[in-house]
Every structure is written in structure tokens, then in C-alpha cells.
Image (cartoon, rainbow, N blue to C red):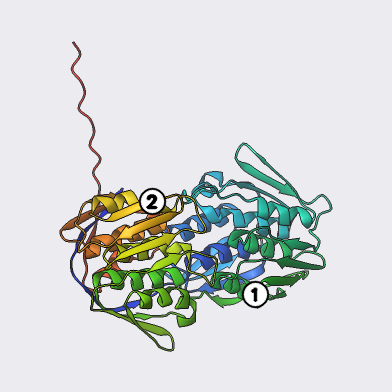
Amino acid sequence: MTKYIIHGGKPLSGEITVSGAKNAAVAIIPATLLVDGVCRIENIPQISDVTLLLKILEQHGASINTINKHTMDIDCSDISRIGTAFDLMRQIRASYYLVGAMLGRFGRAEVSMPGGCDLGVRPIDQHIKGFTAMGAEVEIRNGIIYANVPRGRLHGAEIYLDVVSVGATINIMLAAVLAEGQTVIENVAREPHIVDVANFLNSMGADVRGAGTNVIKIRGVDKMRGGFYSIIPDQIEAGTYLAAVAATGGEVLLRNVIPKHLDCITAKLIEMGVTIEDREDSVLVRRTDRLLRTNLKTLPYPGFPTDMHPQVAVGLCLAEGTSVVTEGVWDNRFRYVDELRRMGAKIQVDGKIAVIEGVKALTGAPVKACDLRAGAAMVIAGLCALGTTEVEDVFHIERGYENMVEKLRGLGAEIECVDVIEKVPSPGIAI
């Protein structure tokens, strides 16, 4: 076990390179199951979720060759085993993408119910709705998803998602690329990583159209070949460092970004008094004066992303005036509030609405990372707080951020990762 120790109160300054998109990588890696050949994938982030998925593929018989720390050759041509690595699958939310990929290739799948962050009820009913419309039979027994196609191959279908779901959109897309006929998915999610997954599939020989709009059409193909693909930069990692500069002050240049993908985030930061300069493949962020209050509500893309809510909320804790944050996606996103209160934040929560009254400063304290994005928020709070902050349960953070400590130290932050020595209780004295 490790924890981060942060000595805060210093502005950030310098340059940082954003890694490949976590949410794209954890879908593209399972998608290699659909490909008959070698997939060379570049810009893979070094995060624990990726490591788990690669181990799962290897346990299923995939051949993985590391070219460098961000480039890998993945060959799933000889995979034949299904229904292994349940213990690994339980540790990661994105394991459910294996259902769509395995159904598409083998006509059956056995996958553990997914794990990941506890953000409230995260049902997979829309995934199952899509699979059954395409001819699959799906049931869940003892925490395992069992799916099979009695006729051997999925068929095209028209599917309307009852709610906009990123996971269901991608999973149905994976299942459909090798299905017979055409599949039409309506009311789909439009996040940049969905477009990236579609582009990956097309580069390997699939026929996916409309990703990034409300309707995706997939014409099934008989086979997908190997090829090369580079994952897009991580929108949320970039947004996290933008939010960090907003909270601490300073000036930082973010390299390897797609500025258009950040518009939904930078628009809100500009309202808060942050200066943002978009460049071709980089963004300059600067904050000198005290932040201004604002209201925000999380929505599916292109709305403000739920994955940026906790990080920006830290800045609002220091803003002049009172802000209102409405969480429109997850039930348990406000679990980070108690941790910020330890540091002097004034936040009141009622259901999915939080009222934040800005204070002059936060004070360092021992806090925990409740989930991935809440953990990033705790790091940001520690960076701008007076004194020392210790962040525990940082394994949540390492699920989605590559080398966060090293990157922040490159910006002048005083942060280190240290081992936690668990105390063994002394044996009692028998009387």
C-alpha cells in the first residue's frame, strides 16, 4: 500500500504531456479480441486498469509483445479459451467489454460482473438489451454473466437505448462489427473515446458509421485484419491538470491534447476566471486572480463531464461567492465532500446537488481517495492547501492516471509517493 504526501500552497508552472485516453484504451484492448491478426496500438497509458486487461487477455491465450512503454503488439488470433480470469475481471469496470467482444467473435461469453469505482447503481441492462436484440441469450448467475448465441452468430438489429450509456454504446458496437447484416443503435453516447473506438475498429476492417452523433450504424463484416492504431489523448487527464492549475494558480502548457475535446471543460474554467489559450495540439492554462463562483451540472458529452466534477469542485471551494454543483449522472459522486470538509471546505449536499461556499484557503489534512476522480480531487486539494496533506487509497488514482506524482513534480509540486507500513497489533497478555 502507498500514499501521497503533499506539501501544498505553491502555484504550478511548466509543461506536461498528456497520456493516452484511459476510457478509450480500456475498450480498444478488449476489442482486439475481434481481430484476426496483430494489432499494434500506440499511446497506451501506463495505468493499472490497462495492466489488468492485458493480464486478462494473456490468460485467455493472447500474445502480447511490448515494443516500448506506450506501444504494444496484441495478437488474439489463437484465443480459444473463454470464462477464465474472473478474479481479475472483478477488479475493473471495463471488463464488461469482453462480453460484447467475445459474443461477436465466439458467439458466447462468460465474464464476471464488473468492479471499479463505487459510484452508485451502474446496471448493464442496456448492454443486455442490445445483445438480446441481436440474438443472444444472457443471464447472470452467482456474479457471472453468461451469454451465448444459439444460432452461432449474432445478427443485425435496430436498438434504441433507453438512457444515454457510454458502456452500452461501446459494448453493442463491439458485438455488432462481426454480426450478420446491419445494426442501428439510436440514442447513443457521443464521447470522444467512443469515436476513437469506432476509428480503431474501422482501421482493422470494420464498417462503423455515425460515431459522435446520436445514431451509429454498423454493417457487419466477415473478418477483421490486424493493423496500426494510436489512441487519442486523455480528455479527463488533461482536464484534471487544467483544474489543478485553476485551484493552485500558475501557468502550465499541456501538450498532446485535442483542444476541441476540452471545450466542455475549458468553457466552465473560463467562467471561473481562468485564462485558456488553445493551440494546435496543446493548451496553455493560467490563473492569477481569485477564482469566481459558478454553477455547473454534469451531463453526457458534449455537456460537462461527470468525471471532471470533483476536480473542478476543489477550485469552487476557493472561489469568491457561492457555487451550486448538480450531478446529473452518478448517485455516489459526492462521497469526496467529507474529505474536503476535513480540509476546511464549506459544502452542503442535498441529494444530487451541492452548495459550495468559497473559503480563503484549505488546510492540509489526512484524506482518502474514495474513487478514481475523487482521488484526483484530493491531490488537487492537497496541492493548493496550506500545510501537509496525506492521501491514502491511491490505488484508485493509479487506475486512471499515468505517473501523476512525477508529472506534478515536474511542475514544481512538492509531492511524493511513500509506502504505508501497516501496524501489527501487539499480542495480548493472557490472564
Q: Residue placed at 46% from the left, 78% from the top?
A: 263
Say which element carries label 1. Answer: loop
| Residue at image coords 51%, 59% | 328
Most distant residue in the left direction = 387
Q: In the rendered structure, find residue 349 and report the number of the disc placed on it.
A: 2
**Quadrant of the image occupied by residue 356:** bottom left
Screen quadrant of the C terminus: top left
Spatial CA span between label 2 and label 1 = 34 Å
Circle 1 sits on which residue?
A: 213
Q: Nearer the viewer, residue 212 or 297?
A: 297
Which of pointers 2 and 1 lies earlier in the amino acid sequence?
Answer: 1
* Mark closer to the observer (2, 1): 2
Question: Whole-percent x and y of residue 296?
Answer: 43, 66
Q: With respect to residue 81, does 356 lie above or below? A: below
Question: Residue extending furthest front?
Answer: 321
Q: Amino acid at mark 1?
A: Thr
| Camera-nearest residue between 360 and 32 | 360
Q: Hey, which quadrant is residue 406 in on the image?
A: bottom left
At horizontal 80% and vertical 62% (from top left) the residue drawn is: 157
